[in-house]
Image: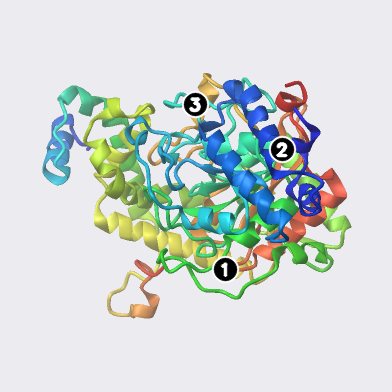
Amino acid sequence: MGLSVETVRELLRECADLDLPPAEVERLMPRVERLQALMRQLRALDLGGDDPRTTHYIDDRRLSP
Amino acid sequence: MSELTTLTIHQLAPLLERREVSPVELMQETLAGIEALDGRLRTFITVWPEQALADARAAEAAIARGDYRGPLHGVPLSIKDNIAVAGWPTTNGSALMADFVTDYDATVVRRLRQAGALVVGKNNLHEWAMGVTCAGGPFGSVCNPWDERRVPGGSSGGSAAAVSASLVYGAVGTDGKGSIRIPAAWCGIVGLKPTYGLVSRFGQLPPSSSSFDHLGPLAKDVTDAALLLQVLAGHDPQDPTSIPSASRDYPSALVRGVQGLRVGLPEDFFFEQADPEVAALVRQAVGVLSALGAEVREVAIPSLRHMPLLDAVLSSEIPAFLWPFVRQGPAAFADRTIWERIVVGQLVRTPDTLRAARLRNLIRREFLATMETVDLLAMPTTPTTAVPRDTPEQQAAMPLLGHQSPVTVLTVPHDIVGMPAITIPCGFTAKGLPVGLMLGGRHWEDEVVLRAAYAYEQAATGGYQIPPARRHG
């Protein structure tokens, strides 16, 4: 289920200290939905190295440049 | 307008050194060219004739007393307007920074001045360097010198159009998703994104995406790009991402040819997405490299197909600096989509950003493995040629969060991995629009990229071609 306008408005207010009128948030919704779809795809990717029992710092690819 | 202004730096330099051409006359000719054409092309945001002429007089006096500093001495260049030049505004193509003036030069500007180059002005760009059209901004829409109804590409579109139209001899731009290479390809010139860490970014204001951004030269031909890189490259303690490396002689390396170099064709990603006419011209260019002695083979980098997901990294990296402006609301941005992208980027969660970083590392590892089997990659710089202004094609060129711009899709990979990549003109479509061949190399092997580009240029195109905007005035 997607995020509602009111939820997005609340998230921006609480997390980014940005208070936007509902009409402005409504205009953002197509982008928000694209972002959600993107994140779902990203989470579904098998990037390997997910097992906490066998991953060493040398295998940790999260932060290394 | 004088023929002098259509010369390249390497053609001009001996004339300046022998005092057959005066830097002051040259600057006057340059300013006359800008005066005549830039009302139409809108490649500059700031031009400061008095300062430029004063610098030219100083260069003339120095050369006269035997203090010749090298091939950039007395040569008029321009700087993208997100890079600081002391005493001049650095606007980022935004009305919000129209009055922002630094009292210091960016490192690249300081290095150019030390080499005797003359800064003529600051080039127009896509607002905040966050787009590829350079259209609709507060300082006017930049026109492509090959077809003034089309955009120049971006975000360094003013820089590329100015060099292409011979308004200056070279320029410095920035490249985070292709912003040097895209406009260089669409305007029919050479653009180099160097290895990450080779050219200082001190004075690029504000940083937009530290792990993606690079500074580099836009030039009329490959030799000029090498001459510019020679001056721009070098460690700078004022940039924490600047990496000390051995000094290299880029211009001297040009003539070594491509005999025995292994050139990889990444068919699975780069060619699949290019227009057939663009892909055909690039394949022809690769055929030239092969005829010159390069060994051409197919390679694959499968993880690149996930690259659009990396927008998450960019989305969460940019707002840190632009957030104070974002808070002023969408009306503060000429391009509303930039405001929208940054605001929506606030919804990216940290675990997703870390996951995107892992994906980036996966792509980087595949690139590194591929580059152990070849010395260079050869591919199209952009999938299409320059798009017409104020059309749905222009609209489609702008990146959407989570949907990569069709224009940047081929240039972003080398920003992700930090390896050097150059674009050089490789022909024209039936509509007379330039097409770019992109050559990418290993980290710190910028000279190999330049050397292959030079070999191709010498064999196939002969170098700089004057666009209609300049030919017909």
- Specify which label sits upstream in the sequence, 3 or 2: 2
According to the picture, the residue beneath numbered tag 3 turns out to be B135
Q: Which mark is in front, 2 or 1?
A: 2
Subunit of label 1: B
Q: CA distance from mark 2 to mark 1?
A: 49 Å
* Mark 2 vs 1: CB contact within 8 A: no
User: Residue beneath label 2, please?
Assistant: B25
Which residue is pictured at 58% across the width and 59% down the height?
A: B114
B36 or B56, which lies in front? B56
- Give the side of residue B46 with respect to residue B325, left or right: right
Question: Could you tell me the amino acid type at mark 2?
Answer: Glu
Q: CA distance from mark 3 to mark 1?
A: 37 Å
Residue under label 1, please give it: B368
Amino acid type of the residue that numbered disc 3 sits on in the rendered structure: Ala
Q: Position of residue A16 (x, y in %)?
A: 17, 44
Query: In the visual, does B316 lie left or right of B6?
Result: left
Residue B455 image offset from top left, x and y in percent: 81, 56
Which quadrant of the rendered structure holds the C terminus of chain A? bottom left
- How much space separates mark 3 and mark 2, taking CA atoms? 33 Å
